[in-house]
Image (spheres, coloured by chain):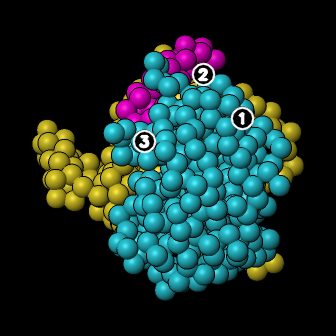
């Protein structure tokens, strides 16, 4: 089953073409890697999918629905969640509050029930908190629940970002360089975590990553772009031995 | 059921308090009673203004300098209601006790003020809240002044002569009740999912959006709620001073409110209350120094900005135990 489909998508910034004629397809429950040298346009692809800006040309389909013109919060509601290359937590909020923010769009209660502290509001709040604590416990962070997010160590901030994204109940999770700044041990743990995400939360993962060990170790399909264009797609073995990929990373001899 | 009981108890307590204040300050033995009473009333109105502005500026992080505009809209809209419609209203209900009718009229005026200011907030908020930082500040400053100049040119509410003949409906009870209302409302809001959305927008707009929060809607909501409370404060102000002039609603008033929340600590509910009380009482205390008053006042502010930039209670909200102090 196709979950996400990019159909000949291009994006220009003035005279610069960041993404050119890109087509790719992510299936349900798939672990999909998107790699390429610096400046290849990977983060632009993420921003196009999440509606930060629209594609100049082409169409993006998610569960057979076009994402054209949808603002980021509607894309999130449709079932696409993301993390950021440079961590973007709600720094002054506690860990559990960070998770709860991602549940705001699922609320059933309106302002009046908030002000009246109606039983509906209180039970929803309680259910949200329980779900958030459960999510944190899956990430081994329940003891950090009431810490201020900005005070967490780097690795925990990365994990919190992933947990927060999962709290939106996504069908597709976009991870933008989750292993950046991690040591080899943490990277190994991250790989296990990414596999768990797929198995326990039943969502597909689209991974942008520079750490080749992580990408090759985790992704079933790897899509390589350079200068905004596709140069190869396939499994780890295929991509690693592809002449164009080697050329893009190492330069042509 | 328990909720209703609590509300009734709270109202009874407020009523008892107002009876006490009236007995002590207005009819009582204290020499400067009425003077202190007036400061108390103004402090209450300022608390409502500060707490409501704190919702946009401190909690949602959208720096608005147009709060006096909504204060004015509420004051004039409700005063127009009581001046033109009040006499007919009171006459048609003559068979009931007068104090009850007046309370009813003020309640109606409060609702009118809230509604009018909320509509003004919506009209101002939708276009301007797409802007950020300095630009938002400038635009809200401009809108605040536009509102004031518009009112200045409406003859039915006195124009440049000022609006007089407003019935003195505001009692201590109403001020205390509105203060209680705004504190409870903002406190419950901040602890709810909505409040977390406000804070998330302040902390990181891009991440908030990616987590499914509609930025414009969230900002406008905070702005409109703040405006509605400012409008109600305006209603009580008009029916307390019995005379309105647009000079009370210049951008200087907006800055006064900003200074209150900056002094108390942006984002802190208790800080806003404290800031409003201190900045209402302080100028009065320094009245003896006459010309030195403003110097001391501004010096105090500069010292606070240097030695405690997060405000007196910034980062120490009683409702959120572990909160890092933030600058806007």
Q: Is residue B61 magenta?
A: no
Q: Which residue is mark 1?
A: A7
Q: Are marks 3 and 1 in contact (CB under 8 Å)?
A: no
Chain of the residue that carries numbered disc 1 in the rendered image:
A
Classify residue A3 as left or right of residue B24.
Answer: right
Q: Is residue B151 magenta?
A: yes
Chain of the residue that carries numbered disc 2 in the rendered image:
B
Whole-percent x, y for residue A252 in the image: 37, 38
Q: Disc 2 vs disc 1: which is toward the camera?
A: 1
Q: Residues within 10 Å of mark 2 (few under 14, many from 20)?
A: many
Mark found first going from the N terminus, 3 or 1: 1
Q: Nearer the viewer, residue B200 or B6?
A: B200
**Figure quadrant of residue B129:** top right
Q: Which chain did the image draw in cyan? A: A
Q: Residues within 10 Å of mark 1 (few under 14, many from 20)?
A: some
Query: Mark on residue B157?
Result: 2
């Amino acid at each position: 089953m196709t979950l996400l489909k990019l159909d000949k998508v291009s994006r220009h910034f003035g005279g610069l073409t960041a993404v050119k004629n890109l087509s790719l397809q992510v299936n349900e429950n798939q672990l999909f890697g998107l790699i390429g040298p610096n400046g290849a346009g990977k983060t632009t692809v993420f921003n196009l999918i999440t509606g930060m800006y629209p594609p100049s040309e082409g169409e993006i389909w998610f569960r057979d629905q076009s994402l054209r013109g949808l603002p980021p919060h509607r894309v999130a509601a449709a079932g696409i969640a993301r993390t950021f290359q440079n961590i973007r937590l709600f720094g002054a909020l506690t860990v559990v509050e960070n998770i709860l923010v991602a549940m705001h769009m699922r609320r059933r209660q309106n302002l009046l029930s908030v002000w009246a502290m109606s039983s509906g509001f209180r039970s929803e709040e309680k259910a949200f908190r329980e779900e958030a604590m459960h999510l944190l416990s899956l990430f081994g962070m329940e003891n950090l629940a009431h810490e201020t997010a900005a005070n967490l160590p780097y690795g925990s901030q990365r994990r919190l970002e992933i947990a927060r994204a999962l709290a939106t109940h996504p069908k597709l999770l976009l991870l933008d360089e989750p292993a950046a700044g991690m040591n080899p041990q943490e990277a190994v743990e991250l790989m296990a975590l990414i596999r768990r995400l797929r198995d326990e939360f039943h969502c597909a993962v689209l991974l942008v990553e520079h750490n080749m060990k992580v990408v090759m170790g985790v992704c079933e399909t790897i899509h390589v772009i350079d200068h905004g264009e596709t140069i190869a797609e396939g499994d780890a073995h295929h991509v690693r031995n592809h002449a164009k990929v080697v050329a893009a990373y190492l330069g042509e001899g | 059921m328990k909720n209703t009981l609590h509300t009734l108890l709270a109202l009874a307590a407020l009523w008892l308090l107002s009876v006490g204040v009236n007995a002590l300050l207005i009819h009582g033995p204290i020499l400067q009673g009425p003077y202190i009473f007036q400061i108390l009333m103004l402090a209450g109105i300022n608390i409502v203004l500060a707490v409501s502005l704190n919702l946009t500026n401190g909690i949602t992080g959208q720096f608005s300098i147009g709060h006096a505009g909504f204060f004015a809209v509420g004051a004039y809209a409700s005063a127009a209601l009581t001046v033109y419609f009040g006499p007919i209203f009171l006459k048609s209900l003559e068979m009931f006790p007068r104090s009850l009718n007046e309370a009813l009229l003020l309640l109606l005026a409060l609702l009118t003020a809230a509604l009018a200011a909320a509509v003004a907030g919506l009209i101002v908020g939708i276009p301007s809240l797409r802007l950020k930082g300095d630009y938002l500040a400038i635009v809200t400053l401009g809108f605040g002044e536009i509102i004031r100049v518009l009112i200045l040119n409406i003859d039915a509410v006195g124009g440049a002569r000022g609006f007089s003949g407003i019935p003195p409906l505001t009692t201590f009870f109403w001020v205390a009740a509105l203060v209680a209302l705004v504190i409870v409302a903002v406190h419950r809001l901040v602890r709810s999912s909505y409040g977390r959305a406000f804070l998330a927008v302040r902390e990181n707009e891009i991440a908030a959006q990616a987590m499914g929060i509609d930025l414009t809607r969230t900002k406008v909501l905070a702005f409109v709620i703040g405006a509605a409370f400012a409008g109600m404060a305006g209603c009580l102000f008009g029916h307390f001073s019995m005379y309105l002039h647009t000079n009370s609603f210049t951008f200087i008033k907006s800055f006064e409110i900003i200074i209150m929340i900056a002094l108390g600590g942006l984002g802190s509910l208790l800080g806003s209350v404290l800031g409003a009380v201190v900045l209402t009482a302080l100028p009065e205390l320094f009245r003896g120094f006459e010309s030195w008053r403003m110097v001391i006042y501004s010096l105090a502010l500069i010292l606070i900005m240097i030695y405690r930039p997060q405000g007196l209670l910034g980062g120490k909200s009683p409702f959120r135990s572990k909160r890092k102090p933030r600058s806007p």
